[in-house]
Image (spheres, helix red, strand yellow):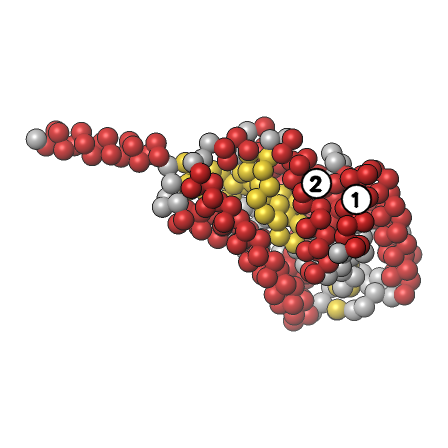
Amino acid sequence: MKEFVFCLASVAVASLAQAQTTWDLPTGYGANTFQTQNVVQFAKDVEQATGGKLKITVHPGGALFKQPEIKRAIQSGLAPAGEFIISGMSNENALFGVDSIPFLATSYADSKRLNEVAKPAQAKVLAGQGIKMLFSVPWPGQSLYSVKPITSADDFKGTKMRAYNPATTKIAQMLGASPVTIQLPELSQALATGAANNFLTSSASGADGKLFEQVKYFYPVNAWLPRNVTAVSQKAFDALDKPTQDAVLKAAAAAEKRGTAASEKVDADSIAILKANGMTIAEPSASVKKALAAIGETMAAEWLASAGSEGKAIIDAYRKK
């Protein structure tokens, strides 16, 4: 009798193990960032909504794959899901870089409108690569950090400017700085060793990464609001039953709304943290504003030329909204 009960228990455990699907979800951002915390909550919501049928394990800080490798990992089946900054992929398709056109969308309201018109085209490209976009969340506006004060556009010349996507590389070059590709988790060390002198990133990244320990000047230029996309392999998504798919999509919609609200709050809180830790918060000079505005106009025209008719349709729709 004992053997029979043990047998039944073993079958039950085996059946449960077969019924449960597990996904690894790598992200290049630290566990303390609001983006990662939002993805972790998404994973919890999915597990709860499916009664444990789908369990998603988030791997923060580039532990499983580095930030530039995550989309490729999803595409090649090495990871069923992941989070990545979509503008980092703009070298492979210009449509992925629309949110990083300087001074096109400089507020949360503008970012939302731009995303609404760009998302269908981006999702179509990703679908062709076997990837399903689940949700996207904007970072606070990209602002300027510098080890030394920047009083004129000439102050960029000869400096090392951290870059994380093609847009930031181009900006550094147009300012006369040398672009240095450094991912966010390595930025603090790079600043400490002099590998970077200035950079564009969000207030949240500066506060979370304690960049105020190496950088003392912050200029809220709010150039653009780049988006992190959480996506899944279409093959992995299709393998789920319909109720589980619906639960994932519902949790994704909630994550986009929650993450955007968190981003707005984090922006205000982070600027206060930077100031409290001794950073000088100052408006950029007229010279810097003029230089950045000119770069924005040039890069918008270049983006339109590279993005073709689909890109033009996105910008036209955005400006009419």
**Left or right of residue 184, residue 19 in this image:** left
| Residue under label 1 | 313
Cβ atoms under marks 1 and 2 closer than 8 Å = yes
How far across and how far down the image is residue 260, in percent?
Answer: 61, 58
Q: How crowded is mark 1: few (under 14 residues within 10 Å), some or many (20 or more)?
A: some
Q: Quadrant of residue 269?
A: bottom right
How far across and how far down the image is residue 67, in percent?
Answer: 63, 41
Give the residue type that dot 1 points to.
Ala
Q: Is residue 200 above or below residue 232?
A: below
Question: Quarter holding the C terminus?
Answer: bottom right
Q: Which of 226 and 255 is in front in this view?
A: 255
Mark 1 vs mark 2, CA separation in Å: 10 Å
Give the residue type that dot 2 points to.
Ala
How far across and how far down the image is residue 290, in percent?
Answer: 90, 60
Q: Which residue is drawn at 50% across and 33% down?
A: 238
Q: Residues within 10 Å of mark 2 (few under 14, many from 20)?
A: some
Q: Earlier in the sequence, mark 1 or mark 2?
A: 2
Q: In this view, does 245 lie above or below 30?
A: above
Q: Which of 72 and 301 is in front in this view?
A: 301
Q: Is residue 97 above or below residue 112?
A: above
**Left or right of residue 254, residue 267 in this image:** right
Q: Nearer the viewer, residue 60 or 189?
A: 60
**Left or right of residue 246, residue 99 in this image:** right
Q: Which residue is drawn at 55% across and 29% down?
A: 77
Q: In the drawing, what numbered circle is on residue 121?
A: 2
